[in-house]
C-alpha cells in the first residue's frame, strides 16, 4: 500500500475517533448534569429518607408487632408510598403541573409504586428466603435495586407533563 494513502487513512481515522470521543464526552456531560438537576437531587433525598423509613418501619413491625417479614415490608413500603407522594408532589416536581388533578397524580403514582412494590417484594423474597440474608439487609438491597425503576417511572409517567394533559 502506498505510504501516503496509509497516512491519509490513519489521519482520517484519528479525526473520526476524536470526533466520536468528543461526542461521547458531550453526552456524558449532559447525563451527569441531568443527574445533578435540582429535581433529581430532591428526588434522591426523598428516596433516601423513604428508604430509611421503610427499614425503620420494617424493623418495628417485625420486632415489636411480630408481623411476618414479608408483611412488615409490605406495610412499611405502603406507608412510605403515601408519605413520599405528598413530599414529591409539594417539594420536588414541577409546580406547573399543579393545575392538574391531585387525585389523578396520586393514583398514577400509586400504580407506579405498586409495580415498584412488587419488584421490591420479589427481590426481598429472593434475598431473604432463598439466599437467607438478614431481613433488613435483604430489604436494603431490594430498595437500592428498586430505586432506579421508581425514578424512571415517576419522572416519565407520574409527573410527566405530557401524560397529565
Image (spheres, rainbow, N blue to C red):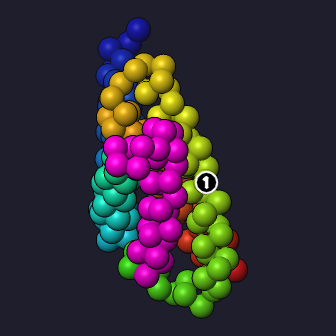
Question: Which of the 4 image quarters holds residue 135?
Answer: top left
Is 89 included in the stretch rendered in magenta?
yes
Is 87 included in the stretch rendered in magenta?
yes
Q: In this view, does 56 lie above or below 139?
A: below
**Dot 1: what SS?**
helix
Q: What residue occupies the far right of the structure in this picture?
A: 165
In the image, which residues are magenta?
61-90
Residue 141 can be seen, yes or no: no
Residue 29, percent across and down? 31, 54
Q: Is the magenta stretch mostly helix, strand or loop?
A: helix
Q: Measuring 43% from the left and 27% from the top, which residue is drawn there?
A: 128
Residue 161, percent across and down? 60, 75
Q: Is residue 34 left or right of residue 110?
A: left
- Mark 1, other Cα within 10 Å: few <14 / some 14–19 / many ≥20: some
* The one of 63 and 41 positioned closer to us in this rendering: 63
Q: Measuring 47% from the left and 62% from the top, which residue is drawn there?
A: 79
Q: What residue occupies the far front of the structure in this picture?
A: 65
Quadrant that contains the C terminus: bottom right
Q: How many labels does the image show?
A: 1
Residue 110 can be seen, yes or no: yes
Q: What residue occupies the far bottom of the structure in this picture?
A: 99
* The one of 131 and 38 positioned closer to us in this rendering: 131
* The one of 134 and 7 positioned closer to us in this rendering: 134
Q: In this view, does 51 lie above or below 67?
A: below
Quadrant that contains the N terminus: top left
Residue 43, percent across and down? 38, 64
Q: Name the residue under label 1.
A: 114
Q: Measuring 37% from the left and 54% from the top, which residue is drawn there?
A: 57
Residue 140, percent across and down? 35, 40
Amino acid at each position: 500500500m502506498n505510504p501516503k494513502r496509509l497516512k491519509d487513512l490513519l489521519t482520517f481515522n484519528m479525526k473520526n475517533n476524536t470526533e466520536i470521543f468528543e461526542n461521547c464526552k458531550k453526552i456524558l456531560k449532559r447525563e451527569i448534569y441531568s443527574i445533578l438537576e435540582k429535581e433529581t437531587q430532591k428526588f434522591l433525598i426523598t428516596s433516601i429518607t423513604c428508604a430509611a423509613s421503610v427499614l425503620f418501619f420494617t424493623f418495628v413491625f417485625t420486632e415489636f408487632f411480630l408481623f411476618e417479614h414479608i408483611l412488615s415490608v409490605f406495610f412499611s413500603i405502603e406507608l412510605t408510598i403515601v408519605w413520599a407522594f405528598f413530599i414529591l408532589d409539594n417539594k420536588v416536581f414541577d409546580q406547573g403541573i399543579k393545575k392538574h388533578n391531585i387525585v389523578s397524580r396520586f393514583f398514577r403514582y400509586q400504580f407506579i409504586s405498586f409495580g415498584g412494590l412488587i419488584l421490591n417484594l420479589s427481590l426481598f423474597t429472593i434475598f431473604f428466603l432463598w439466599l437467607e440474608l438478614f431481613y433488613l439487609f435483604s430489604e436494603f438491597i431490594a430498595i437500592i435495586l428498586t430505586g432506579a425503576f421508581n425514578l424512571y417511572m415517576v419522572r416519565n409517567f407520574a409527573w410527566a407533563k405530557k401524560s397529565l394533559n
